[in-house]
């Protein structure tokens, strides 16, 4: 039986068809990184040298279950960690439901895939048994058909992580689908699987994970499941999930509408892609949709019809806002159909909506025409063109081959539209414009992966015009730590556990007494390692810790008309310096200082931190740019 102080890592080399198991040292590795995002980052750092091509056999991809996955209500997340082909940064993306809990119950806290198979394969893990199976008949298939085929070949309760044609075609915004309707969407990690000729991973485990006090854990889990399933503050999520959120984001000037050119839109327009029309289409979901041990069950599973085609899809705010509002499409069924297409083909809905919205704006501005696009595109709101473009991106056809590179690279290839390309470090922005909340743009600018709304929100609802952003940065940094801790433990962000509950669960599972503040050091270690690695690879923080030009344009209409993401450029730079100071990083160069790295218990990385600081100094000159 698996023991908590014997966390096992399954290591599969596809080039040599070799499978091995390793046990983490609890004191030196396990308790420092725990699981999920933090453990995945550590394993990547130790295995892949800077300068590695993300689509080469030398890159690895890690599936790291949260320490609490399958043990605690609302904890079912698995983190996928690799080097992103979109950004060339260490990237982590997350998905819920059964894959993480099954991986743990199969006996493993993490799975490392390295090398490249000669032919298409899928991996089948059933408890302690591991097989590398032929997937030639699955190559070219959409995600739903892959999952259904693998379940017929194995059995119907396995959880399947798969890629669609987009991943096979090395589309740099390709996602990894989990059981058809969930996705580790960001960073193009589906292309990493595709580069390894790995079509899917099927996992099942039904063994008991050993914990320190199983009876106490059962008591705590039952208490919190009951409490959370009836909590009034979560009722909204139980009814709508996140599908009603466009009404909120639009009202507070944070929507991505029309390629982020109109962060405020009228309520009647936002309602077209909000809770009520989605609720009207809701149907009963399959067993694998609502999540293992989830007390909220906020996933909304709907049936819709578009131009004679009936389909089913799981949808949420980011899908609706990016495939709809960001492209100017407010036809509910058309947007749900786009959602269905990206799920089947295996493309990130956020990045897809972003690049299509960007192209639509180029058309609107007369910067690109039909001859170059290859199809008739009218601009914002053109749902027929959006559908064609999704197919073209997935199969790298025509202009789709350019959009498949992501919005930053697409703007470079076309030589236009850089000023309206909304990304940070190459990662397309999600459905939250920071011009509606003070210091939120700091989170985007400094996030380890690029533009992510999951790297900490400022503890304020004030607009950026309320005062200097630096005043909010300490609170933002702590919120980032909390969010990353949830990703480390495998807990969904919507499950609002108080700090003392996390501490109690941790003690019950591991037998260790540990303060919440000490637990927050775990994701800080991962962030420091990511920063050091990315700097040694290519990152120049003072230049690349920034935001797109669009967010420094004044809001054109609505209650925050005239507001920008920061008061001015000086406000932005000073706020970012403050973030560096709070983290114990060099305030001019944005690199973790050796003494801060040592304080985090990473003595073995101190020399790397020194080298990273020297690298940045040499790249930008001793005088600095800030």
Image (cartoon, rainbow, N blue to C red):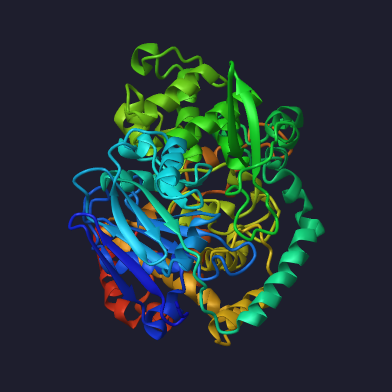
Question: Is residue 469 found left or right of 428 in the rendered image?
Answer: right
Q: Quadrant of residue 401?
A: top left
Q: How many marks?
A: 0
Foreground: 388 or 533?
A: 388
Q: Residue at x 38, y 67 (%)?
A: 128
Question: Is residue 80 found left or right of 114 in the rendered image?
Answer: right
Q: Is residue 415 visible?
A: no
Location of residue 363 in the rendering, given as x and y in whole percent from the top left corner: 46, 19
Foreground: 541 or 567?
A: 541
Say above or below: 485 vs 264.
Answer: below
Q: Residue at x 74, y 50 (%)?
A: 238
Q: Quadrant of residue 213?
A: bottom right
Location of residue 538 in the rendering, given as x and y in whole percent from the top left corner: 28, 55
Location of residue 148 in the rendering, given as x and y in whole percent from the top left corner: 46, 40
Say above or below: 106 vs 438.
Answer: below
Say above or below: 405 vs 371.
Answer: below
Q: Residue at x 40, y 66 (%)?
A: 110
Q: Residue at x 22, y 49 (%)?
A: 117
Question: Is residue 318 found left or right of 109 in the rendered image?
Answer: right
Q: Is residue 73 visible?
A: yes
**Quarter of the figure with the N terminus:** bottom left
**Quarter of the figure with the C terminus:** bottom left
Location of residue 36 in the rendering, given as x and y in whole percent from the top left corner: 47, 65
Q: Quadrant of residue 258?
A: top right
């Amino acid at each position: 039986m698996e023991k908590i102080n014997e966390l096992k890592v399954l290591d599969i080399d596809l080039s040599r068809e070799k499978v091995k198991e390793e046990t983490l040292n609890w004191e030196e590795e396990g308790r420092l990184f725990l699981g999920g995002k933090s453990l995945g980052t550590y394993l990547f750092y130790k295995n892949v040298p800077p300068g590695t091509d993300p689509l080469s056999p030398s890159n690895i991809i890690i599936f790291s279950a949260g320490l609490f996955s399958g043990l605690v209500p609302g904890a079912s997340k698995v983190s996928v960690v690799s080097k992103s082909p979109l950004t060339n940064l260490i990237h982590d993306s997350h998905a819920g439901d059964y894959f993480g809990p099954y991986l743990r119950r199969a006996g493993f806290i993490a799975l490392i895939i390295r090398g490249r198979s000669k032919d298409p394969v899928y991996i089948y893990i059933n408890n302690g048994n591991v097989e590398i199976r032929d997937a030639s008949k699955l190559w070219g298939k959409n995600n739903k058909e892959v999952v259904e085929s693998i379940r017929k070949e194995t059995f119907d309760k396995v959880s399947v992580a798969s890629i669609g044609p987009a991943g096979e075609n090395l589309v740099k915004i390709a996602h990894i689908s989990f059981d058809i309707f969930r996705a580790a969407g960001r960073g193009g990690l589906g292309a990493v699987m595709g580069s390894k000729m790995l079509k899917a991973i099927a996992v099942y485990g039904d063994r008991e994970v050993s914990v320190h006090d199983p009876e106490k854990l059962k008591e705590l889990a039952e208490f919190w499941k009951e409490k959370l399933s009836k909590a009034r503050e979560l009722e909204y999520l139980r009814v709508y999930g996140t599908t009603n959120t466009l009404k909120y984001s639009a009202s507070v000037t944070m929507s991505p509408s029309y390629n982020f050119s109109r962060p405020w839109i009228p309520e009647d327009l936002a309602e077209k892609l909000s809770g009520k029309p989605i609720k009207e289409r809701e149907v009963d979901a399959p067993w694998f949709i609502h999540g293992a041990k989830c007390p909220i069950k906020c996933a909304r599973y709907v049936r819709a019809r578009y131009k004679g085609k009936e389909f089913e899809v799981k949808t949420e705010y980011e899908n609706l806002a990016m495939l709809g509002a960001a492209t100017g499409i407010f036809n509910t069924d058309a947007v749900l159909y786009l959602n269905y297409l990206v799920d089947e083909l295996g493309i990130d809905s956020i990045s897809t909506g972003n690049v299509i919205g960007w192209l639509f704006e180029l058309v609107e501005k007369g910067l690109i025409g039909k001859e170059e696009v290859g199809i008739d595109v009218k601009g914002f709101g053109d749902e027929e063109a959006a559908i064609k473009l999704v197919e073209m991106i997935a199969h790298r056809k025509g202009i789709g081959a350019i959009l498949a590179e992501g919005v930053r690279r697409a703007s470079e290839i076309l030589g236009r539209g850089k000023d309206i390309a909304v990304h940070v470090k190459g990662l397309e922005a999600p459905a939250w414009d920071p011009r509606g909340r003070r210091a939120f743009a700091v989170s985007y600018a400094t996030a380890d992966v690029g533009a992510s709304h999951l790297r900490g929100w400022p503890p304020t609802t004030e607009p950026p015009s309320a005062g200097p952003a630096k005043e909010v940065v300490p609170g933002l940094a702590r919120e980032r730590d909390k969010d990353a801790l949830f990703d480390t433990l495998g807990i969904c962000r919507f499950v609002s556990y108080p700090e003392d509950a996390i501490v109690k669960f941790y003690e019950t599972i591991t037998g260790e007494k540990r303060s919440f503040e000490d637990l927050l050091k775990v994701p800080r270690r991962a962030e420091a390692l990511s920063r050091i690695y990315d700097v040694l690879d290519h990152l120049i923080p003072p230049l690349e810790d920034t935001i797109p030009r669009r967010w420094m344009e004044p809001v054109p209409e609505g209650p925050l008309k005239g507001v920008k993401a920061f008061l001015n450029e000086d406000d932005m730079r000073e706020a970012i310096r403050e973030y560096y100071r709070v983290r114990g990083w060099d305030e001019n160069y944005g690199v973790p200082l050796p003494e801060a790295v040592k304080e985090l218990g990473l003595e073995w990385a101190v020399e790397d931190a020194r080298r990273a600081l020297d690298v940045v100094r040499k790249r930008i000159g001793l005088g600095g740019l800030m």
